[in-house]
Amino acid sequence: MAQSLDEARRRLDDEFGQVRRRLAKIHKALDKVEEAGPEDDLHDLLKDLEDEVKEVRTGGLTGSGANGHRRALDDYRQIKSG
């Protein structure tokens, strides 16, 4: 847990930025689904989209994703409320 409100805010902003930067992967996968035609494999395209969303949410093998943001937000709110 962060020691000060400023430290907690920096961590919150960092975690938020990490998640926001990864949203491009979701948008790219969603674009493929939206551009698909009747002869494209929607099942696999939706699976790819699902995988990207899960990775952004959980962080995959390399990070904490939105879970890290949630923890940082909880810490920030706790410190802010005193």
Image (cartoon, rainbow, N blue to C red):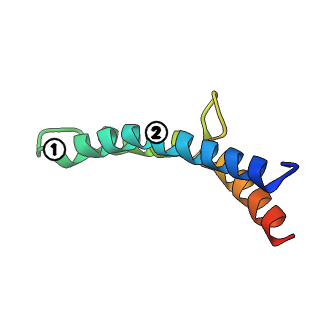
Residue 47's x, y, as percent? Answer: 39, 42
- Count residues near mark 2 (Cα–Cα under 10 Å), then give few for <14, some for 14-19, many for 20+: few
Residue at screen point 84% across, 52% down:
4
* Tag 2: amino acid: Arg
Residue at screen point 63% across, 27% down:
62
Residue at screen point 75% across, 65% down:
77
Disc with the residue nearer the chain's start (2 vs 1): 2
Residue 82's x, y, as percent? Answer: 87, 70
In the rendered image, which quarter is residue 65 located in? top right
Q: Secondary structure at mark 2?
A: helix
- Which numbered tag is attached to residue 25? none
**Residue closest to the far left:** 38
**Residue closest to the far top:** 62
Q: Measured along the vertical axis of the image, is residue 47 above or below residue 5?
A: above
Residue 67's x, y, as percent? Answer: 66, 49
In the rendered image, which quarter is residue 26 located in? top left
Residue 48's x, y, as percent? Answer: 38, 38
- Which numbered tag is attached to residue 35? 1
In the rendered image, which quarter is residue 35 located in? top left
- Contact, CB < 8 Å: mark 2 with mark 1? no
* Tag 1: amino acid: Glu
Closest to the observer, 5 or 41: 5
Q: CA distance from mark 2 to mark 1?
A: 23 Å
Task: Determine which residue is flagged by label 2.
Answer: 21
- Count residues near mark 1 (Cα–Cα under 10 Å), then give few for <14, some for 14-19, many for 20+: few
Q: Secondary structure at mark 1?
A: helix
Q: Measured along the vertical axis of the image, is residue 74 above or below residue 1?
A: below
